[in-house]
Amino acid sequence: MPINVTCPSCLKRFTVSDKFAGKSGPCPSCQKTIKIPDKSEEIVIHAPEASGPKDKAGKAILKPLRRKDVKISPPVLIASLVSAVVVFAIAFGLGLSGGRPPTALLAAGALLLAFPLAFVGYWFLHDDELEGYTGRQLLLRCGICAAGFAAIWALYAFVPRYVNNYESMGEYTGLDLAIFLPLMVILGTIVAVASLELEIVQGALQYVLYLGVTLVLAWLAGTQLAQPLGGSEGQRTVPAAVDNAPETEKDRPEIPNLLQ
C-alpha cells in the first residue's frame, strides 16, 4: 500500500511504496534527504463509536433517526389544483352573470380555497433545515390554518357593518379598508405562526398569499368589498332637502277671477 509523504523542505507531496517505510532517501523535487514514515507513525482516523445498546457482535441495535422532508403527495396536489380551478371558474361565472354573489357562496369559496393555499404555502415557506410536519399532523394543522384564514374574512364582512351600521360591504369606505387590511394581515400572521409554527415573516407571506388570491377571486366574481374596489352600488343616497320657504306671489298659481 503506497505511503503519502510530504517533504519538510519544499512541501512537495508524493507517494512511495510501503517497502521504503522507515528508510531515508532524496526528495524527488529538491533532492533533500528525508525519512519515509513507517506504519507506527501513520495517522489513522477512527470513526466515532456508536453509543447506545449493542448486540453480541458489538453492533449498535438502534438505528439513527432520519429527517423526513415535507413532500406534496400526488392526491393532495391533484385535489388542491382541482379545488383552485373550480373556485376560479365559479368566480369567473359569477362575474359574467352580473349578479351579486350570495354571502354563503363567498364564505364557502374562502374556506374551500384556504386549505390548498395553506398546504402549498407551507411546502414552499417552511424552514428546510428543520423537520417539517407530515401526514395527518400536517393536514390537521393546515385545516386549522384554513379555518382561521376564512374566519378573518368573516370578521371583515361583519365587524365594520355592525360598528358603522352599514347594510353591505359596498358601503365600506376607504378608511375602513385602510384600517382593516393591516389588522387582517396581523391576525393572519398570528394564525399561520400558531398553527404551522412558521417564522413571523414566513407566516405573513403565508397569509398574504391567501389574501391576494381571494382578492383576485372577489374581483372576478364582482364582489364589492369597499367603495374604492367597486362601482357606486351600495352607496348611501341622501334625500334632497325639502324647501319649506314660504311661497311668494310669483310662485302661487294664478286663479281666475270668477266675479268679473
Image (spheres, grey):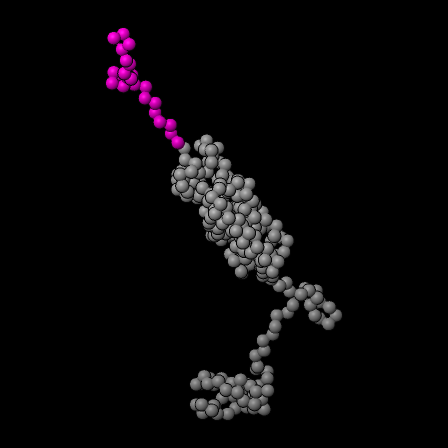
Front residue (pair 97, 140): 97
Nearest the eye: 19 or 149: 149
The residue lying at 41 percent from left, 43 percent from top is 229
Q: Nearer the viewer, residue 151 or 61?
A: 151
Find residue 174 and report its horizontal and vertical position in percent: 39, 40
Residue lying at 59% horizontally and 58% vertically, measured from the top left = 78
Q: Pinpoint residue 133: horizontal percent, then vertical percent.
A: 59, 55
Residue 156 appears in the picture as rendered = yes
Q: Position of residue 213 (x, y in %)?
A: 48, 50
Name above or below for residue 56 compared with residue 85: below
Left or right? Give the position of 68 relative to 186. Answer: right
**Seen in the image, is 131 located left or right of residue 214?**
right
Q: What stretch is highlighted in magenta?
A: 237-260
Q: Could you tell whether 128 is left or right of 234 in the image?
A: right
Number of disc labels:
0
Q: Is the magenta stretch mostly helix, strand or loop?
A: loop
| Residue closest to the far front | 260
Question: Is 132 in the magenta?
Answer: no
Q: Where is residue 128 in the image (x, y as percent from the top left)?
A: 53, 60
| Farthest-out residue, top | 259
**Which quarter of the figure is the C terminus placed in?**
top left
**Is residue 179 among what the camera can see?**
no
The quadrant the N terminus occupies is bottom right
Report if residue 242 lies within the magenta region: yes
